[in-house]
């Protein structure tokens, strides 16, 4: 296969094709408003009537998501999958569609699709079929894509996602979206546009890479809901290991079907916003497109059935091509691939077959990991943390494991540990664009620091100071830093009495206020004592001494 890849690399030079013409419409200014939630599901291409009350029009959003399968090789060939490899260096004869080459299905890709379907509560079809979808792109050498149009591998699933609502956005609101189907298909190559020379170069490294296309029904009503659903799906795929979900590398690409209508009436004509590769941009693109369509209808216009792209610089969607004419993809059964058969359990396998070479649903089901929603619920119930903290932990790869390792090594309450993990640790990681695995402070080191604070050896302010030193000088323990810089808690009663007396004598007005009943002023005096001791004074003892001296 290595020889065939090398030969193909020599044959498949960078091809020049005419640069496609871009069509731009005049930009439309508009005001944004909150989009009301709807649960409409029906599909109709009837044009809704423009109403005088614009608040009656609501958005309807469905999604098509292409997730690149986390596999070492492509869907139907042995070519390796690697991001940012030299152009046309990972191309086999089959990827380049040379005559006489035949597809060989990658079992890992099938198992990934089945595992994803199980995690999303789908029905797994024991028999699924492959089809050819014909269309011409310069980066699609065969002139067709192998997909699953008639009978996909998984159907009828449910994705549950969460939003934060309420006045303080602390209330967790759970919603669901229906997964119509999950199908296996090939990716196309990549077109590299050279504006200087007015040409397009073709890189076929991505051609034939395995994809899962997940089709979500139009159960969402705004960009926020769509973004939350995609983020939850991204976490699920990453937890399963079926897709790395790195949107910046094109491993997760979203097409949004957007329309507006009046609740109770048929859905309006929809537009498709293609290839959105950021969750933040997805929310903005959908909200912009909903408002654009509302403005068109309010002016008495007609929404066009078209494909649009999102321009992140202007924050607007721009037209690419119309979809008024029905495109004929000339679907046909793939003649070079037999039906894909998966088995429920080992008992259902044909006699004489090797179970290791078959896709067995029960085996895959038993290997499912803890999913994000279950993990969040467990964190809240087990440790008594707030729901928003559970989202923060689960959203960051490796942070749950870090948090639980710290808890196992310290007696500090989970609610106090969570503050250190989500504030101090995560803040430092974000500032330096580091992952949890790259943290210079290990869970054991943080646990030691928190234990020293919990047992009264250092104050909370000194603990933060020590954490900064631990971050800057990896390898030094909290105890070493405290000893070297003499940061231990000052609890000598005679020394603290002397310092407190000095503070009381130099602030007679504050003392008078305390004696007149304003006990809050005592906190100011405590702060002055801490300043004198550089935050090392025992706060409990200081409070007792100051209360005695201000009676």
Image (cartoon, rainbow, N blue to C red):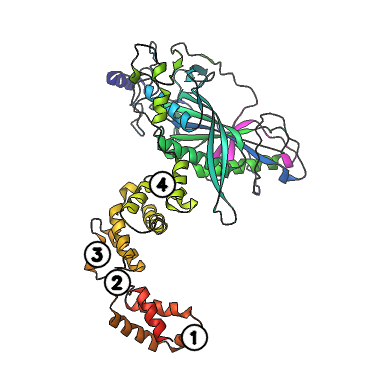
Q: Secondary structure at mark 2?
A: loop
Considering only order in the chain, which callout, 1 or 2, is on the residue closer to the N terminus? 2
Vertical side of 266 occupied by 527: above or below: below
Q: Which residue is mark 2?
A: 489
**Where's the C terminus, which quadrant?**
bottom left
Vertical side of 155 occupied by 282: above or below: below
Residue bounds of the magenta highlight: 297-326
Q: Please tell me whether mark 2 or mark 3 is closer to you in this view.
A: 2
Q: Which residue is mark 1?
A: 513
Q: Which mark is residue 25?
A: none
Residue 19: x and y in percent read 49, 29
Residue 146: x and y in percent read 47, 19
Considering only order in the chain, which callout, 3 or 1, is on the residue closer to the N terminus? 3
Viewed as shown, does residue 264 lie left or right of 2? right
Considering only order in the chain, which callout, 3 or 2, is on the residue closer to the N terminus? 3
**Where's the N terminus, which quadrant?**
top left
Q: Is residue 152 magenta?
A: no
Q: Which residue is mark 3?
A: 481
Q: Please tell me whether mark 4 or mark 2 is closer to you in this view.
A: 2
Check disc 1: other Cα within 10 Å, few if <14, some if 14-19, many if 20+. some
């Amino acid at each position: 296969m290595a020889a065939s890849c090398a030969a193909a690399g020599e044959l498949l030079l960078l091809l020049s094709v005419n640069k496609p013409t871009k069509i731009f419409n005049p930009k439309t200014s508009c005001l944004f408003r909150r989009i009301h939630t709807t649960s409409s599901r029906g599909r109709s291409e009837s044009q809704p009537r423009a109403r005088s009350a614009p608040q009656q029009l609501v958005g309807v959003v469905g999604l098509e998501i292409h997730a690149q399968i986390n596999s070492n090789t492509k869907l139907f060939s042995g070519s390796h999958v690697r991001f940012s490899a030299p152009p046309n260096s990972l191309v086999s004869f089959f990827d380049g569609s040379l005559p006489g080459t035949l597809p060989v299905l990658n079992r890992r890709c099938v198992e990934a699709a089945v595992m994803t379907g199980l995690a999303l509560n789908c029905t797994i079809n024991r028999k699924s079929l492959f089809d050819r979808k014909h269309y011409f792109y310069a980066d699609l050498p065969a002139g067709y894509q192998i997909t699953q149009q008639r009978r996909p591998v998984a159907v009828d699933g449910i994705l549950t996602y969460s939003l934060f609502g309420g006045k303080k956005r602390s209330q967790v609101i759970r919603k669901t979206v229906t997964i119509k189907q999950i199908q296996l298909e090939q990716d196309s190559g990549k077109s590299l546009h050279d504006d200087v020379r007015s040409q397009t170069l073709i890189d076929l490294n991505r051609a034939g890479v395995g994809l899962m296309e997940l089709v979500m029904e139009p159960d969402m009503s705004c960009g926020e809901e769509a973004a939350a659903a995609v983020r939850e799906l991204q976490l699920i795929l990453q937890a399963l290991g079926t897709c790395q979900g790195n949107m910046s590398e094109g491993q997760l690409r979203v097409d949004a079907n957007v329309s507006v209508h009046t609740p109770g009436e048929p859905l309006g004509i929809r537009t498709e916003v293609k290839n959105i590769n950021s969750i933040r941009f997805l929310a903005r693109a959908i909200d912009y497109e909903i408002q654009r369509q509302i403005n068109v209808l309010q002016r008495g216009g007609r929404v066009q059935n078209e494909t649009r792209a999102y321009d992140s610089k202007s924050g607007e969607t721009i037209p690419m091509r119309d979809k008024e004419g029905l495109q004929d993809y000339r679907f046909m059964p793939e003649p070079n691939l037999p039906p894909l058969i998966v088995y429920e359990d080992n008992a259902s396998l044909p006699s004489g077959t090797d179970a290791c070479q078959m896709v067995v649903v029960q085996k895959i089901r038993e290997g499912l990991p803890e999913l994000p929603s279950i993990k969040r619920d467990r964190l809240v119930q087990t440790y008594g943390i707030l729901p928003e903290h559970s989202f923060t932990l689960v959203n960051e790869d490796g942070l749950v494991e870090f948090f639980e390792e710290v808890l196992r090594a310290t007696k500090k309450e989970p609610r106090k540990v969570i503050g250190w993990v989500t504030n101090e640790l995560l803040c430092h990681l974000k500032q330096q664009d580091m992952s949890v695995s790259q943290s210079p402070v290990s869970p054991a080191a943080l646990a030691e620091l928190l234990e020293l604070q919990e047992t009264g050896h250092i104050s909370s302010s000194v603990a933060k100071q020590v954490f900064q030193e631990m971050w800057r000088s990896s390898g030094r323990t909290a105890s070493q830093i405290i000893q070297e810089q003499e940061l231990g808690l000052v609890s000598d009663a005679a020394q603290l009495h002397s310092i407190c007396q000095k503070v009381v004598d130099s602030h007679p007005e504050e003392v008078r206020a305390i004696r007149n009943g304003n006990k809050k002023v005592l906190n100011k005096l405590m702060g002055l004592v801490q300043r004198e001791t550089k935050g090392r004074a025992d706060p409990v003892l200081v409070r007792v001494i100051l209360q005695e001296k201000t009676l």
